[in-house]
Image (spheres, rainbow, N blue to C red):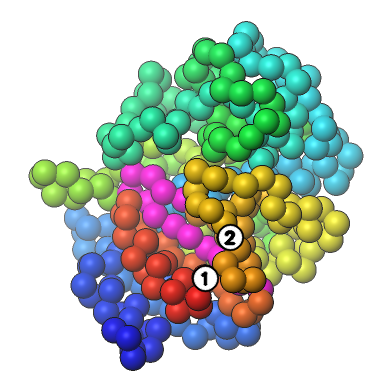
Amino acid sequence: MKNMSLADKINSLIEKNHFSGGISIKEKGKIIYENASGYADRSNKVCNNTDTRFGIASGTKFFTALAIGILIERGRISLDTKVFDIIKYDFPFYSKDITIEQLLTHTSGIPDYYDEDKIDDFDNFYVAIPWYDLREPKDYFPIFPQEEMKFLPGEKFSYCNSGYVLLAAIVNEVSGIPYTEFVEEYIFKANGMKNSGFFELNRLPENTALGYVKDDKGWRTNIYNLPIVGGGDGGAFTTVGDLYILWDAYFTFKILSEDLTELYIKPYTKAKSEGENIYYGYGIWLSKEDNTLEEYIVGCDAGVSFKSAVIRKNEVVYTVISNTGDGAWPIISEIKEFYCI
């Protein structure tokens, strides 16, 4: 594949791996590659297209972080606000000194209900409460581990889904609006992301891909593997086109002020567990390779693999979304290699 164009390499991987999902790459403001393949609905042979909505799993955390940023700029909270001054649920083992900033940066030290370091099989992970009963942030609180803190607040990085559920709960409490409605109104609708939203898995709108998991009987949907509707740590649906709108709105300061935008993408903490040159800002990952910075959001779940990234040095934006748990990664690797990141 050495002398092939990027498009040819991607097309070869699509065919080889039976890729199911959407791909789009933009250079200097022009789309240089866009494609969709596979099935949004395997049973009914409904094909994916470039406007298909896909779940993005933990990519949702960026929306949660932006919702918090909007409330900060309204003067309702600050980065130093103590989390449990707002959230009144009894977590007896959790430090009362944890701040919003520490939740944003995964440095709070609270134990995770979905600890990715301890889960062996993401396609068959279940919690004590049925997934269909997890509809809003407070529904998750009973499944948070009632155990000692992993470390003191601010001490180090440890990826934590529970922290982003708490952030969504803060959005609820402070705004008086359900978290999902707040994101839909003030991030999606406000910026023209018309195809993005939070949808119940058993009530998906038209042109939305079902997520698929492969087992010894073949393909099955992920409806019994995830919360019935997305929350602060995952579960939003979007399209490759809407993600261009998101990045443009973010970097032209239509969502947050310039000062807060720049603060969000500072390499706040080194994510040693993720790689030598991987850092985390506020809801966003940063990778530095040979003086090239890649800013990105990423997600992986049963029936979901996703990455959307900006390489400002090269004026490149790319998104790969798959409705399978590992379909996106070979194509993402090819794109990264092409752009030497």
Q: Position of residue 217 (x, y in %)?
A: 10, 44
The part of the chain drawn in magenta is 299-312
- Residue 312 lies, with reference to residue 78, above or below; the image says below
Q: Which mark is residue 83?
A: none
Residue type for callout 1: Ile
77 sits left or right of 305 in the view = right
- Residue drawn at (70%, 31%), measured in percent from left and top? 154
Q: Position of residue 96 (x, y in %)?
A: 73, 16
Q: Position of residue 243 (x, y in %)?
A: 57, 65
- Residue drawn at (28%, 74%), measured in percent from left and top? 13
Residue beneath disc 2: 287
Residue type for callout 2: Ser
Residue beneath disc 1: 341
| Residue placed most toward the observer, 231 or 325 | 325
Q: Secondary structure at mark 1?
A: loop
255 sits left or right of 165 in the view = right
- Residue 1 lies, with reference to residue 286, above or below; the image says below
Dividing the picture into quadrants, the one containing residue 312 is bottom right
- Residue 94 lies, with reference to residue 288, above or below; the image says above
- Residue drawn at (41%, 49%), measured in percent from left and top? 300
| Residue placed most toward the observer, 273 or 203 | 273
| Residue placed most toward the observer, 5 or 60 | 5
Decide which of tag 1 and tag 2 comes sooner along the chain. Answer: 2
- Extreme residue in the left direction: 217
Dividing the picture into quadrants, the one containing residue 269 is top right
- Residue drawn at (43%, 25%), measured in percent from left and top? 133
Cα–Cα span, label 1 and label 2: 8 Å
55 sits left or right of 63 in the view = left
Work out whether residue 242 can be spotted: no
Please say if the residues under marks 1 and 2 sit with CB atoms less than 8 Å apart. Answer: yes
